[in-house]
């Protein structure tokens, strides 16, 4: 382990069997003109309490082995990744990430920002955004209103995602964002949102959360076994797609659904098929 303790903050580098190629930056003072020099074989990066760090330039570096990244208490970060300004190198870094933790980033507006040019939306540089990401944990990001833009679900993006955990984000309104003009389309064709490996969806203490996906969205999550929607009473719809056997809803892989709201809230939820909530009713577990 290497440890540097300067007026600028703290830097640790670990290199052993338990913590291979891990770097921790704590209370480092870095301006826009400063270059962040890190090992090329970096696999695990944590940046904590570095308030002078702006939008993460780390994703502009050629760290093709980076697997885990955690950002905590960095109040200068407004956006983690911008699709318009990202280079092919930054997308390579994202393509290898398996776990991302974002905590107490009170200036964060976008995890992935799709910048607009005039009336059009800039297309993604690559159709494969976060293709190997397995775990996403996000909490206490008080200004964030949506978790994903729809562009992340194009191509093979997020297809290996196993865990989505979001809690205590006071302004979060939607998990998968959709443009209002697209929502205004009169077609009734369902929008299929496929996350084949998603096992756990936990949404907790999100007082402004209104929807998980667009109005016509249907989530196809064949591996989903645990759902928690707690202290998020504005949610009006759970867009879960149940399988069908002989035209009747069949019980999915879900083992438990945790809710904190009264039974009346469950009864008021909108479903693609009204029979679905009856099938899922035995799985409910109340948490107060």
Image: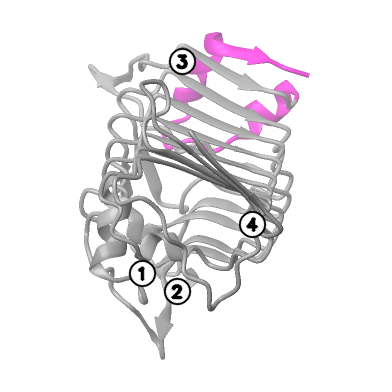
* Residue 285 falls in image quadrant: top right
The residue that mark 1 highlights is 83
- Give the mark, 2 or 3, whose residue is nearer the N terminus: 2
Q: Which mark is residue 28?
A: 4
The structure's colour scheme is one colour
Please tell me how crowded label 1 is: few (under 14), some (14-19), or many (20+) other residues with Cα within 10 Å: many
Rendered view: 196 above or below 108: above
Can you give x and y, in whole percent of width and height, for residue 149 in the image?
43, 59
Name the mark nearer the viewer: 2 or 3: 2
- Give the mark, 1 or 4, whose residue is nearer the N terminus: 4
Name the mark nearer the viewer: 1 or 4: 4
- Give the mark, 4 or 3, whose residue is nearer the N terminus: 4
Please tell me how crowded label 2 is: few (under 14), some (14-19), or many (20+) other residues with Cα within 10 Å: few
Please tell me how crowded label 3 is: few (under 14), some (14-19), or many (20+) other residues with Cα within 10 Å: some
Q: CA distance from mark 2 to mark 1?
A: 21 Å
Image quarter of the C terminus? top right
| Residue in the foreground of this view, choosing between 152 and 81 | 81
Name the mark nearer the viewer: 1 or 3: 1
Q: CA distance from mark 1 to mark 3?
A: 41 Å
The residue that mark 3 highlights is 279
At a point 49% along the width and 70% down the height, the residue shown is: 180
Q: Which mark is residue 240?
A: none
Can you give x and y, in whole percent of width and height, for residue 212 in the image?
52, 45
Name the mark nearer the viewer: 2 or 1: 1
- Give the mark, 2 or 4, whose residue is nearer the N terminus: 4
- Give the mark, 1 or 3, whose residue is nearer the N terminus: 1
Name the mark nearer the viewer: 4 or 3: 4
């Amino acid at each position: 382990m290497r440890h540097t303790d300067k007026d600028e903050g703290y830097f640790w580098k670990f290199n052993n069997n338990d913590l291979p190629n891990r770097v921790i930056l704590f209370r480092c003072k870095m301006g826009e003109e400063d270059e962040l020099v890190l090992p090329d074989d970096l696999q695990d990066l944590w940046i904590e309490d570095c308030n002078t760090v702006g939008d993460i330039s780390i994703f502009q570096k050629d760290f093709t082995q980076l697997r885990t990244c955690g950002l905590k208490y960095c109040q200068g970060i407004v956006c983690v990744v911008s699709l318009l300004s990202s280079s092919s190198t930054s997308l390579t870094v994202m393509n290898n990430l398996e776990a991302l933790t974002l905590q107490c980033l009170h200036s964060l507006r976008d995890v992935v920002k799709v910048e607009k040019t005039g009336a059009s939306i800039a297309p993604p540089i690559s159709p494969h955004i976060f293709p190997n990401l397995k775990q996403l944990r996000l909490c206490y990001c008080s200004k964030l209103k949506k978790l994903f833009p729809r562009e992340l679900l194009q191509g093979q993006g997020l297809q290996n995602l196993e865990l989505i955990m979001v809690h205590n984000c006071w302004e979060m309104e939607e998990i998968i964002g959709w443009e209002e003009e697209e929502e205004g389309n009169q077609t009734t064709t369902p929008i299929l949102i496929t996350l084949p490996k998603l096992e756990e969806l936990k949404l907790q203490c999100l007082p402004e959360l209104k929807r998980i996906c667009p109005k016509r969205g249907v989530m196809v999550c064949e591996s989903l076994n645990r759902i928690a929607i707690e202290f998020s009473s504005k949610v009006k719809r759970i867009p879960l797609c149940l399988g069908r056997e002989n035209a009747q809803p069949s019980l999915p892989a879900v083992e438990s659904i945790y809710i904190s709201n009264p039974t009346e809230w469950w009864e008021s939820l909108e479903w693609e098929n009204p029979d679905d909530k009856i099938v899922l009713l035995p799985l409910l577990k109340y948490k107060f």
